[in-house]
Image (cartoon, rainbow, N blue to C red):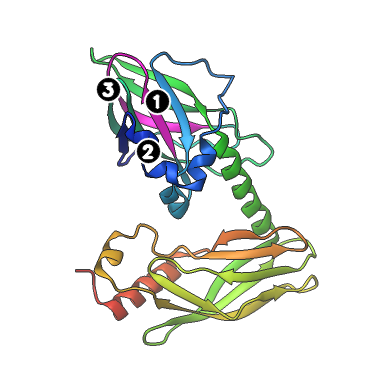
Amino acid sequence: MRRTAIAFVVGAVAACGGPAAGPSSDASTSSSVTPAVPAVPGIEAEIVRLRTDEAIGGQVQVRLTDTGDTPFTVTSVALRSPGFAPVPPTAITAEYAPGRVIDLPVPFGDAVCDASPVPASAELTVTRPDGSVEPLEVPAEAQVLELVHAQECDVLGVTAVVAITVTDLEDGGDALTGSLTLTRREGAEPVTAARLGRSVLVEPTADLPLELDGDAEAASVPVSFTPASCDPHVLAETKKPYVFPLALTVGDDDEVVVNLPIDETLRARLTALVQRVCGPPS
């Protein structure tokens, strides 16, 4: 099991804190209680997505509340939803007292696009005050999973049509250059890459829009990467330094944002670029 950090809010602080300020958190508060899993006395669960989850990608939060009159400790947590492939539980240590609310970050697996993401539940390992250990499955409010599921399936739909790669890498002093390429996998609809966004750390520049015609197998444009910040705090604290959102459209469908695939070669070259321009981490 993976061990991870947790964040908690107590009592009214949970209602007034940062998560409620984000639009995706607001969406997650609507009722969608799972009917398939019976309620667990003293524990309530809700699936939420914070802005940090959106930035990191691939995870949500299980927001657990101790609604009983005794404490307990959660030592593992996993999301269970028919719309996502199961992943192993995450090992944590979260100590609950009556009324306490703690958000537990959990990864989700690949989207299962022919299944609904709800009903959902939180799979927990709980240690009671007497030392007994209890596996539990707690029903979870999870409307936000419908949004996450739709977004993930949109990405899968686009990447089934076209592969996205960055190749022909060359170091050029304070920049890394290469080619952004769309390669057709299936279908005959035109594909357009309209915008490429920056990460906290690196700014990409490409000659967009890049258009893959319906009868074309591949299309490319030059792309370059330059450090967007050498601020020591940014260099030390960013968790996802190389996440670049690419806006794609297939035919007349709605635009879908896909993270630019970063393989190990590109990641290593980007890291070397940042160190060359900004200096090694202090």
> Which residues make up the magenta segment?
61-80
Q: Nearer the viewer, residue 274 or 183?
A: 274
Vertical position of residue 61 compared to residue 223: above or below: above
Determine crowd level at label 1: few under 14, some 14-19, many 20+ residues with C-alpha closer than 10 A. Answer: many
Let me know if residue 55 appears in the view: yes
Q: Is residue 165 left or right of residue 211?
A: left
Residue displayed at 46% across by 47% down: 22
Q: Nearer the viewer, residue 275 or 255?
A: 255
- Secondary structure of the residue carrying numbered label 1: strand
Cα separation, mark 1 vs mark 3, equals 16 Å
Q: Which residue is mark 3?
A: 97
The residue type indicated by label 1 comes to Leu
User: CB under 8 Å between callouts 1 and 3?
Assistant: no
Determine crowd level at label 2: few under 14, some 14-19, many 20+ residues with C-alpha closer than 10 A. Answer: few
Please state which of the two labelled residues, at mark 3 or mark 2, is closer to the viewer.
Answer: 2
Q: Which residue is mark 1?
A: 124
Q: Nearer the viewer, residue 42 or 219?
A: 42
Cα separation, mark 1 vs mark 2, equals 26 Å
Quadrant location of residue 248?
bottom right
Residue displayed at 59% across by 27% down: 119
Determine crowd level at label 3: few under 14, some 14-19, many 20+ residues with C-alpha closer than 10 A. Answer: some
Main secondary-structure element of the magenta-colored stretch: strand
Q: Quadrant of the N terminus?
A: top left
In the image, is residue 65 part of the stretch drawn in magenta? yes
- Secondary structure of the residue carrying numbered label 2: helix
Please state which of the two labelled residues, at mark 1 or mark 2, is closer to the viewer.
Answer: 2
Q: Which residue is mark 2?
A: 16
Check residue 7 in the rendering and tell me which mark sits there, or answer none: none
Cα separation, mark 3 vs mark 2, equals 19 Å
Residue displayed at 26% across by 64% down: 233
